């Protein structure tokens, strides 16, 4: 009568085949990422310490870094421009889906804190 269910199991609400899958729901979350890099900058804000050039304690490391390198927000903005340009070309639906996912991942970030040390 009820196919091949064990006796009495066809109407059992706890049986796995009688369970209802939960719906997919959207939730707002906060993703926080900490990045760090070691890099080389060039500065004339130095002093000679026993024959070795040393960066001054009050050197404007942030300005020097920003002159020598792009910030993460700048990199993400540029990435979005590249993605937008590629999406205007004739790309496959799979590639377009990937690019949209990549674009969504690159937007919406805010800078909470920058620290430059030497």
Image (cartoon, helix red, strand yellow):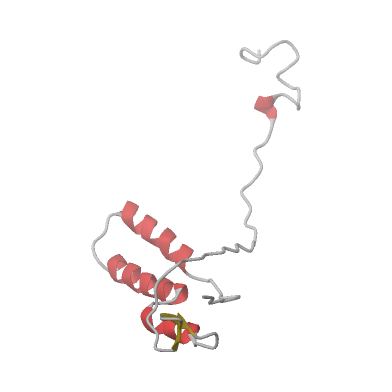
Residue 65 shows in this picture:
no
Say left or right for 37 vs 16. left
The residue under the point 69% across, 11% down is 6
Residue 25 locus on image (x, y percent): 63, 53
**Nearer to me, 2 or 34:** 34
Is residue 36 shown above or below 92?
below
The residue under the point 39% across, 78% down is 41
Q: How many marks?
A: 0
Say left or right for 32 vs 84. right
The residue under the point 49% across, 87% down is 60
**Quarter residue 98 falls in:** bottom left
Residue 85 shows in this picture:
yes
**Nearer to me, 70 or 83:** 70
Residue 70 locus on image (x, y percent): 40, 77
Quadrant where the N terminus lies? top right
Is residue 61 shown above or below 108?
below
**Quarter residue 58 falls in:** bottom right
The residue under the point 64% across, 61% down is 29
**Nearer to me, 67 or 58:** 58
């Amino acid at each position: 009568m009820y196919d091949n269910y064990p006796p009495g199991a066809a109407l059992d609400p706890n049986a796995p085949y009688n369970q209802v899958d939960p719906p997919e729901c959207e939730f707002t979350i906060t993703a926080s990422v900490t990045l760090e890099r070691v890099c080389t900058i060039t500065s004339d804000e130095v002093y000679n310490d026993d024959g070795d050039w040393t960066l001054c304690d009050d050197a404007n490391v942030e300005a020097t870094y920003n002159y020598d390198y792009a910030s993460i927000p700048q990199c993400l903005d540029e990435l979005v421009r590249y993605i937008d340009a590629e999406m205007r070309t004739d790309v496959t639906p799979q590639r377009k889906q990937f690019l949209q996912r990549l674009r969504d991942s690159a937007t919406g970030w805010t800078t909470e804190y920058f620290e430059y040390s030497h």
